[in-house]
Image (cartoon, grey):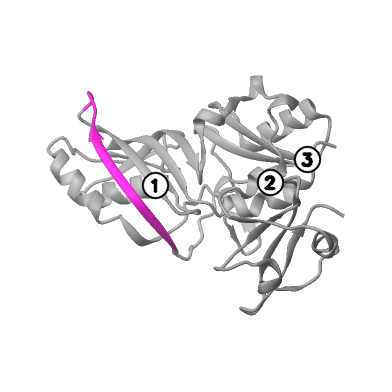
Amino acid sequence: MTDGLVIVDKGPGWTSHDVVAKCRGIFGQRRIGHSGTLDPPATGLLLLGLGRATRLLRFLTDLPKSYEGEIVLGVTTSTLDAEGEVTGRWDMGAVSMREISEAAKGFVGPIEQVPPMVSAVKVGGRRLHELARAGVEVAREPRRVVVHRLEVAGTADPGVVRVAVDCSSGTYVRTLAADLGTALGGGAHLRALRRTRIGSFGLSEARPIEAVSPAGVLPPAEAMRDYARVRVEGELVAAIAHGRVLGRDELGVSGDGPWGLLDPDGRLVAVYEDVDGSRVKPAVVLVV
């Protein structure tokens, strides 16, 4: 079984599960997962965990994301993107780029977002997109997310705005587009979404699914490169491999964690998390 990380540049039309299924065939193993869904029309960065590295995916999911896309003003859809049915139209030709830029500033920082019905969020044990396909709409609790950057720019089409977003995990750019349209006195939807970054992972490292191969697999330690990593030696490696709870001073760690613990050869032995401010415990143990 191959253990490691694969960085894919997903093409349009593929679901994230399609990419996982394709990679199961490429690597001849079932134990493969992804760190964050991209809708079929969206393209860009998708991180896959192979083998034991699937246990590290939750740390990748928590990383901030960056996106580029286009917002179409004056038209709302059932899915908040170009795939849905048109639900409303407004004449927004008089809206200026200055007004759009000013409205966009109101969405930078901590904000509340209501997840779209066509999403993987669960309500009452069922995913929203399953309910939406059945024609059911349910109340959704708003979620706190953080938008670090929301830049807009004009295009050759006066009804279309180019957008660049840096945001926390869990942010829906579709919802940002729809809410921006509402703030401008009309409506809007998102199209041509592309995820360009997840933490320190960028498109320059990604390969299209057609070019994915065992030669491009990164070691599990790379999955923790956005977190503090600590080298451990001697008897401590064995203690960590057996999942011992340790004092912070024994590992020499500080901050909030999590911490990736590497053996002298640079292999990821485990990921530890805080217990009570003075002790740390294993969240994931990879080497036994």
105 sits left or right of 58 in the view? left
Pointer 1 or 2: first along the chain: 1
Quadrant of the image containing the C terminus: bottom right
Residue type at mark 3 is Asp
Q: SS of the residue at dot 2?
A: helix
Residue type at mark 1 is Asp
Q: Image quarter for residue 98?
A: top left
* Range of magenta residues: 144-157
In three-dimensional space, the C-alpha distance between marks 3 and 2, rounded to whole angstroms, equals 10 Å
For residue 21, the mark is none
Question: Which secondary structure type mostly characterizes the magenta part of the structure?
Answer: strand
Residue type at mark 2 is Ala
Q: Tell me whether the residue at label 1 lies in contact with that at label 3, contact meaning CB atoms closer than 8 angstroms.
A: no
Queried whether the magenta region covers residue 154, the answer comes back as yes
Which residue does the numbered mark 3 point to in the structure image?
3
In three-dimensional space, the C-alpha distance between marks 1 and 3, rounded to whole angstroms, equals 30 Å
Q: SS of the residue at dot 1?
A: strand
Pointer 1 or 3: first along the chain: 3
Which residue does the numbered mark 1 point to in the structure image?
166
Image x and y of residue 282, in percent: 74, 65
Which residue does the numbered mark 2 point to in the structure image?
221
> Which residue occupies 47% across, 66% down?
141
Vertical side of 250 occupied by 140: above or below: above
Queried whether the magenta region covers residue 200, the answer comes back as no
Image x and y of residue 42, in percent: 49, 33
230 sits left or right of 67 in the view? right
Q: SS of the residue at dot 3?
A: loop
